[in-house]
Amino acid sequence: MKEDLWNNFHIQLSAHYIVIIAMCIADYYLLVFLSKYLPYAKHIFLRIVADIVGITVITLTLLWLFNFLIYNVLHIPQEGMPSFLIKFVFAMTTNIPILLVLELIHYFQSEQKAIADSEKAKRKVLLFQHETLRSQINPHFLFNSLNVLSSLIYVNQENANKFTKALSKTYRYVLSLTQQPVVAVAEELDALDSYLFLMRMRFENAFTFTVNRISSSEHHKIIPLTLQLLIENAFKHNTATEESTLNITITIDNDYITVENNIQPSGSTDKGGIGLKYITQQYKLYGKDVIVAHTEQLFMVKIPYIQS
């Protein structure tokens, strides 16, 4: 009997390595599956239980295949072979270190990816701030503002003084955002008042602006200049006259802050400024989706809160 076992040793060893390779592959896919649907960050205890159950199922399945290969395919006699329980214990002591090694490799790769993603996110935030600042100080914006200011100086010096202060406050707010990745809705609305004052001096009664506070969510956080940039887009892409007013409404509720305006296409080819595309990209960095919807009469953007 020992001679039979020794003569078949190379067959058993080959089958053993086949099982080990299959075990590594199965453990890898188990790790990928659990990392996607049950990561440690979500629930550590359940993840450990799932790991144990997973490798137990893998071990039992591979042992059954191993026995089938040895006894039914290669027709090696069962006499003198270890019992199924011994094989199971041996397989588990082999499988657990394999999974642990894979977990460690996955952990370090995840850490490196997280660091890389963090650096990428920082670069995107810096790019956003740069593009935002550039959009606010572009020659077109300055030209219009200075033209209005020049007219007011001769017509109404009091309004010219107010206009200068509002313009200064708008720029001061933009420059203060370097160290603020998010701001409170209340702070954003306060800064928006200065920008809207500039627009009122320029467009006079050609537009209306309304804020509907459905819930007290003004302490929630959003990305800076979101509201101002959306309103800037509304003016850029629509006509605003006293005969055909541009109506802008901001609605604050528990889940979103919504900016909407009636559609009156201006036909302008000017595509400058930060745009809705940049805003959408910035919210994606926080795992949030900006909802854009429009009909023939109405354009609406729903902004999710970054922090509640």
Image (spheres, rainbow, N blue to C red):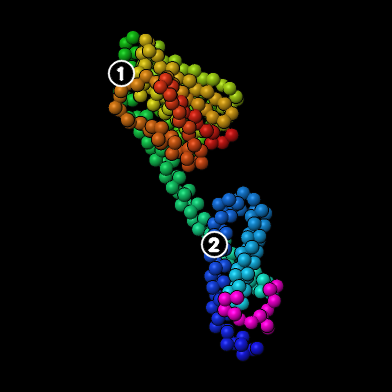
Q: Nearer the viewer, residue 7 or 91?
A: 7
Residue drawn at (55%, 25%) of the image? 252
- The local secondary structure at tag 2 comes to helix
x then y, percent, for residue 281: 43, 39
How many residues crowd mark 2 within 10 Å: few (<14), some (14–19), many (20+)? some
Nearer-N-terminus badge (2/1): 2
Q: Viewed as shown, does residue 294 lie left or right of 74? A: left
Question: Which amino acid, by three-letter code, is at mark 1?
Answer: Asn
* Image quadrant where residue 28 sits: bottom right
* Image quadrant where residue 35 sits: bottom right
In the picture, the disc for residue 193 is: none
Question: Which amino acid, by three-letter code, is at mark 2?
Answer: Tyr
Q: Quadrant of the N terminus?
A: bottom right
In the picture, the disc for residue 147 is: 1
Residue drawn at (60%, 51%) of the image? 38
Mark 2 highlights which residue?
28
x then y, percent, for residue 80: 68, 83
x then y, percent, for residue 136: 37, 29
Answer whether residue 187 is visible to the viewer in this image: no
Toward the bottom, the furthest residue is 3
Q: Quadrant of the C terminus?
A: top right
Residue bounds of the magenta highlight: 72-85
What type of secondary structure mainly makes up the magenta span? loop
Gap in angstroms between the C-alphas marked 2 and 1:
66 Å
x then y, percent, for residue 123: 42, 45
Image position of 173 with respect to 201: above or below: below
